[in-house]
């Protein structure tokens, strides 16, 4: 079953001085939803452009559906639907006409194109606005029209570049839902790039973490955290106003405790494994008034901080303003 | 509403159809041409320019016809009317009211039309984000630029042929006699020359639209080039001519004078508008026998009659070739630039 539909080998793209994509090796399996995750400027879009043969790799190779994207881009584009970030439509044409144009570019005969466009509009929930000019569409509607536009050629793979950018939360939820259903019902492989970890986590089977042109880790979100933070200690934070010295001493004796730091009434305890229960028990037994216990998990947020905050400065401000 | 496997159904149906009829649907190239032509014809700038061109040309026609009518009245021998090439005069004569001739208007407004149809060909698609969407369809990249050129050229051709035939019809209406076959052919060649000339400006503006990311920049650059060639280039040449003219006193040979004259003509013909003017002059005024300086001994023995069409064509052949070459060079450069550009969304 694990047949790979997109495969990249040592894919590299060099722009003058900077390396946008650095020896990337990645296999994407048929039918899965793969999330390419990374801050802005990590090389996600460049990778996607190379998959479609829209830009040539400096070295290495990429094949989609077993076809070399650099040598036979037309064949690849027959099978792959691509939704660019911030997709544009001909604003003086109606949504339906925009779809029909794409259909005709794909050599779909007129009558069939009309049928297909109408049912796709219905599918993405735009059947009411099909006759409306695309210039009047809202951001979310444009994105959904974009999805219909991608699907009209019956693709085997769809590639979505930052598909949720600029849509309101409810719109994002519906959009991701739509993508998930499509993938499940039609067996379409979906590759989506994003810098929104939480959204990616909702729909993706697997995630690749992409920073500075390199793939740092891949797998589902849980494995990702394990891969990245395997040797990190667990940090437990305790708040209690009346911590006694005895308490701290006893805490120090708990197995695997590495370090304890005290800041006013807060304690942070680093340990090799999860000792939250023992910590709480100790505090209570030494008659401390336990107000707050928290185990910091190295989950998405830590991945986020670790790799994204250190990313491109401009990307950071965007991330903040959108969240 | 949801039908699971909907696309799979379609795909299966596709499979059947594909086996029966592997080549289906129109070629994407003609799909793009069709859409571009539709866009041009319905766009405001085309309609406005079309209006201006049609109005000015008809106005100049009207005054020209008045002038010609007077000339006819004065001519005693009505049978020699065809010798005057009245139909061609309709295009070249300016009226008494100071309104320039039809040809002048076409020379002036044609480039603007070409620029208007081309200046945002590529960069507007890029900034609207439709270029990357189009490029992700199974369409060879050069289809886009080729189709845009072909579509604009088709629109221009239709416009100028319509205008030319309109003028001829107008002429028949005024004079009551049809043009001679030669006059007709001369008009056709004039129209073809005009289309080539406008195509040059079209390609120049397409080149700028590939090169510059902003539509405004490319429009302004095209118009700057156009202004340079129509207004300032003549002045520059005059300046150069004065500066390099051989002196009177130093016993100049005829050869030196001729060389200087040839040099000035050469400079002038670097401008596409000069090439076009030479071409129209020769085609529409059959009495023009040379576009360069003529020595007296060359003219000796010549019969003072209009040139036949074949000879006129021979005379403008270098000009036409030059114009076509300039057009092709512009297109070649834009083609190359476009093929090498990386297409990202909206950048």
Image (cartoon, coloured by chain):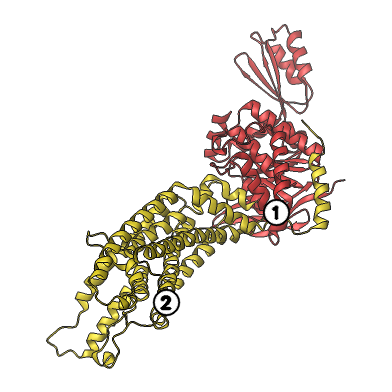
Chain colours: A red, B yellow
Image position, residue A242 (x, y; %): 65, 8
- Quadrant for the N terminus of chain B, please: top right
Helix, strand or loop at label 1? It is loop
Residue B236 visible within the image: no
Circle 2 is placed at which residue position?
A: B182
Image position, residue A132 (x, y; %): 58, 35
Left of B280 or right of it: where is A222?
Answer: right
Residue at (61% x, 28% y) in the render: A168
Residue at (54% x, 61% y) in the render: B150
Circle 1 is placed at which residue position?
A: A107
In this picture, is B131 found above or below B280? above
Residue at (29% x, 75% y) in the render: B78
Helix, strand or loop at label 2? It is helix
Near mark 1 (Cα within 10 A), the count class, few <14, some 14-19 or many ≥20, is many
- For disc 2, the chain is B
Q: Nearer the viewer, mark 2 or mark 1?
A: 2
In this picture, is A288 found above or below B237? above
């Amino acid at each position: 079953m694990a047949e790979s539909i997109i495969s990249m080998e040592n894919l590299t793209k060099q722009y003058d001085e900077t390396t946008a994509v650095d020896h990337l090796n990645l296999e994407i399996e048929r039918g899965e939803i793969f999330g390419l995750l990374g801050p802005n400027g990590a090389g996600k879009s460049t990778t996607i452009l190379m998959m479609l043969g829209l830009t040539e790799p400096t070295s290495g190779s990429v094949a989609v559906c077993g076809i070399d994207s650099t040598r036979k881009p037309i064949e690849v584009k027959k099978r792959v639907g691509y939704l660019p970030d911030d997709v544009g439509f001909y604003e003086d044409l109606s949504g339906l006409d925009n779809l029909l144009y794409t259909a005709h570019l794909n050599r779909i005969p007129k009558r069939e194109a009309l049928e297909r466009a109408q049912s796709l509009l219905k599918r993405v929930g735009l059947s009411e606005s099909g006759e409306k000019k695309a210039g009047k569409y809202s951001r979310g509607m444009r994105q959904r029209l974009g999805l219909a536009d991608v699907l009209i050629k019956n693709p085997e793979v769809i590639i979505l570049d930052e598909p949720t950018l600029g849509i309101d939360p409810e719109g994002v939820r519906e959009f991701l839902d739509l993508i998930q259903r499509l993938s499940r019902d039609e067996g379409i492989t979906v590759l989506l790039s994003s810098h929104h970890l939480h959204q990616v986590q909702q729909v993706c089977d697997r995630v690749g973490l992409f920073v500075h042109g390199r793939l740092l880790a891949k797998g589902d979100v849980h494995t990702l955290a394990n891969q990245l933070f395997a040797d990190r200690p667990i940090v437990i934070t305790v708040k209690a106003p009346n911590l006694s010295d005895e308490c701290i001493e006893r805490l120090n004796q708990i197995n695997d405790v590495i370090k304890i730091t005290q800041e006013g009434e807060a304690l942070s305890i680093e340990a090799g494994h999860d000792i939250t229960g023992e910590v709480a028990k100790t505090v209570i037994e030494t008659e401390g008034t336990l107000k707050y216990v928290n185990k910091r998990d190295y989950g998405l947020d830590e991945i986020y901080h670790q790799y994204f905050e250190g990313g491109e400065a401009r990307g950071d401000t965007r991330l903040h303003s959108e969240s | 509403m949801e039908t699971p496997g909907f696309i799979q159904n379609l795909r299966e149906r596709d499979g059947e159809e594909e086996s029966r009829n592997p080549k289906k649907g129109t070629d994407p190239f003609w799909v793009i041409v069709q859409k571009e032509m539709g866009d041009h014809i319905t766009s405001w700038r085309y309609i406005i320019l079309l209006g201006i061109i049609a109005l000015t040309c008809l106005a100049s026609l009207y005054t020209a016809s008045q002038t010609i009518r007077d000339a006819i009245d004065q001519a005693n021998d009505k049978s020699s009317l065809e010798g005057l090439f009245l139909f061609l005069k309709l295009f070249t004569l300016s009226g008494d009211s100071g309104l320039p001739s039809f040809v002048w208007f076409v020379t002036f407004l044609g480039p603007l039309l070409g620029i208007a149809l081309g200046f945002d060909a590529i960069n507007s698609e890029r900034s609207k984000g439709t270029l990357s969407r189009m490029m992700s369809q199974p369409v060879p990249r050069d289809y886009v630029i080729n189709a845009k050129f072909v579509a604009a050229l088709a629109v221009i051709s239709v416009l100028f042929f319509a205008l030319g035939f309109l003028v001829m019809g107008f002429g028949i209406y005024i004079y009551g006699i049809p043009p001679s076959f030669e006059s007709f052919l001369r008009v056709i060649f004039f129209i073809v020359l005009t289309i080539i000339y406008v195509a040059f400006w079209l390609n120049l503006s397409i080149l700028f639209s590939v090169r510059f990311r902003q539509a405004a920049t490319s429009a302004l650059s095209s118009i700057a080039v156009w202004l340079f060639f129509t207004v300032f280039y003549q002045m520059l040449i005059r300046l150069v001519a004065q500066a390099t003219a051989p002196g009177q006193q130093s016993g100049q040979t005829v050869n030196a004078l001729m060389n200087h004259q040839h040099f000035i003509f050469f400079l002038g013909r670097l401008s596409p508008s000069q090439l076009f003017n030479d071409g129209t002059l020769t085609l529409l005024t059959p009495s023009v026998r040379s576009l360069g300086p003529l020595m007296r001994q060359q003219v000796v023995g010549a019969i003072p009659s209009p040139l036949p069409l074949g000879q006129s064509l021979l005379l403008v052949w270098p000009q036409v070739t030059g114009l076509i070459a300039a057009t092709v060079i512009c297109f070649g450069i834009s083609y190359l630039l476009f093929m090498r550009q990386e297409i990202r969304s909206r950048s």
